[in-house]
Image (tube, helix red, strand yellow):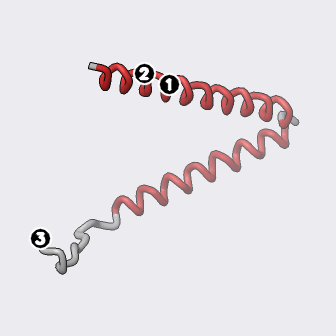
Amino acid sequence: MRRNEKRHSSGTLLPNIYFSLQVIGVLLILSLVIQLVKLFDLAFPIILISCFIAIGFVFYFLIRRKIVIQRQDIYHKK
């Protein structure tokens, strides 16, 4: 392909439809969770659980990043 030629996308609309369906599904589930929180007054436990999950994700990705950096160091030392 030459530099001055433009690439044309030959994709379909199906990925956009699937993405839209996923977004609608997530919004429906979120609205159901909000209704359950209002019904059973679960706001405080859900906030605590969400905080612990977020902290867990942060530590998981930090540890994973540390392992990747260690592997790169080992690879470059050889």
Label 1, secondary structure: give it.
helix
Measured Cα–Cα span from mark 1 to mark 3: 40 Å
Label 2, secondary structure: give it.
helix
Residue 73 position within the rendered picture, expressed as x and y whole percent measured from the top left: 38, 24
Residue type highlighted by circle 2: Gln
Label 3: which residue?
1
Task: Look at the image and tell me in which quarter the N terminus lies.
Answer: bottom left
Q: Residues within 10 Å of mark 2 (few under 14, many from 20)?
A: few
Specify whether 2 is left or right of 53. Answer: left
**From what the image shows, is residue 27 above or below residue 39?**
below
**From what the image shows, is residue 4 above or below residue 78?**
below
**Label 1 or label 3, whichever comes before in sequence order:** 3
Measured Cα–Cα span from mark 2 to mark 3: 40 Å
Q: Where, by quadrant of the figure, is residue 3 drawn?
A: bottom left
Label 1: which residue?
66
Residue type highlighted by circle 3: Met
Q: Residue at x 34, y 19 (%)?
A: 74
